[in-house]
Image: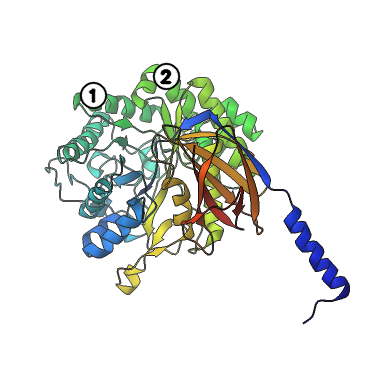
Amino acid sequence: MKCTGVVLVACLLTVACAVEVDPVRVNLRVAEPHQTMDNFGASGGWWADPIGSAWGEPAKERVAELLFSPERGIGLSAWRFNIGAGSLYSGDNVWDKWRAVECFKKTADEPYAWSRHAGQQWFLRAAARYGVRDRVAFACSPPIWLTKNGRGQCDPNVGSTNLRPGADADYARFLCDVLTHFARQGLPFTHLSPLNEPQWEWNGGQEGCRYNNEDMIRLLRALGAEVKAQGLDVVVDLLDAGEWVFLLDDEDWRQWAHKPAPTAYVHANGTKGWGKYRGYIGDLLGDPELRGILGNRLSAHSYWTDNGRDRLVDLRRAVRADADRVSPGAKLQMTEFCVMQHKRDLGMDTALHVARTIHSDLAWAEVSAWHWWLALSPHDYKDGLLYTDWRETGKETVLTSKTFWALGNWSRYVRPGWRRVAADPVDQGDLCVTAFTSPAADKLAMVVVNESRDGQRLWLDSDKPLRNLRLAVTSADHDLAELPQHGDVVEVPARSVVTVLADL
């Protein structure tokens, strides 16, 4: 077909306009620092025990390389190990057999059996081999022999928590015994997370235990004493809240939500007479003793807060302001996220959604850590970075996703100790930017998320000269591909996540 007359003129005008569009000017202020980054991580919960126990060494090594290698994978700098409660032994009604978890101690009188969690232990050793700095031991429920109902799940009759009355010290001792054992094996954990999403009811499906604020504070004090007694060098990580909203004090919540009753948004709430399950910043960081045990930090999850400016931006800014007011210098960490939707998506749709969420956590909540949930999933669900169909096919194969590589745009290049610096515009339509510098302030990694179906052109205006620019691109055509940068204008492909690397 020939292009003639008016059509030809329109074609030429379209091309000319595309060429003449000014690039977006990104103003980098290296001399204006924000939070120091601790790590990017993911979890071995559920999947690592069966796969680490059953798969052959080559297949497991491939998974470890993808997760932990900063050269051939995404270079995670934190790894989460699930200390099971023993729901495997108690006949709990779990949704999936992989969620029925072992325990290092099956009964109160049984000695510890350190051979359990063999699969997770394989990946823990692999993480150490690759130099993963931070290792987090987390528990979703007390062991079944310390619960009121003898199960790793609650029921409506156990009240505010399933932890037996007076068992706080026993539970703290169990957790610290586990950490002491691994420290003696040369695999010390750096963080201990004793509970998970305590405001949900956890009456079935998987291991879980609710705790109202008073229950949680009793356990925290017992844990602080036991950590000291056993001489552990570990960060006590609380509280893996199910959503950012639960951190807000009531008045901050009212100002953000424009509603009068903060109890309305809590599942395990005061209408059942179980107490308070919210306001964690004030109740935990506002208490000097508890703040000291926690090292002036709190953790939360980004579930249900990954859409809309009111949640992606305004909520996170409210949480950050609340923390800064109650306890200046407080660290916030995002310690679990996946997309709560059925059907796998190995492509860019989910990757861009997740990238926007990572950006929002970093830019507005100013988190120092960001962790995905299942590093590897067998499910037809948007919960994995990597996927396998081993349960159906018997083949030890691994599928990567664009979400996996998009997380790598941060985790491979923004290493522990790097610091976020100012970069404007932070959010502009379909474009968002976060920038980081190395501890010596001699290297830059700027992550650009472009959700538009059009490419974007960027002009970098920095208060410190940039040299040796190169790119790492995740898009429909590239999996964290490292490419040279030519010229002064950075070309960001449509629907991509790009890390701009430079020497300073």
Label 1 to label 2: alpha-carbon separation:
19 Å
- Residue 266 in view: no
Residue 186: horizontal and vertical position, in percent? 17, 40
Coloring basis for residues = rainbow
Residue 500's disc is none
- Judge from the rendering whether residue 461 lies leftward or rightward of residue 72; answer left or right: right
Q: Secondary structure at mark 2?
A: loop
Quadrant occupied by the N terminus: bottom right
Q: Nearer the viewer, residue 337 or 259?
A: 337
**187 and 268: which is toward the camera:** 187
Q: Say which residue label 1 marks.
A: 228
Instruction: Name the residue located 36 percent from the left edge and 36 percent from the top edge.
Output: 161
Mark 1 vs 2, N-terminal side: 1
Instruction: Point out which mark residue 287 bears.
Output: 2
Give the image location of residue 170, x and y in percent.
Answer: 22, 32
Q: Residues within 10 Å of mark 1 (few under 14, many from 20)?
A: few
Viewer-nearest residue: 413 or 324: 413
Residue type indicated by callout 2: Asp
In percent of the image, x 53 and y 33: which residue is there?
421
- Image side of residue 405 versus residue 234, left or right: right
Name of the residue lying farthest toward the right: 6
Q: Nearer the viewer, mark 1 or mark 2?
A: 1
Q: Quadrant of residue 109?
A: top left
Task: Give the amino acid at mark 1.
Answer: Lys
Please indicate whether residue 472 sits to the left or right of residue 377 in the image.
right
Is 285 situated above or below 59?
above
Q: Position of residue 100 (x, y in %)?
A: 29, 55
Residue 18, given in percent of the width and then of the height, sits at: 74, 58
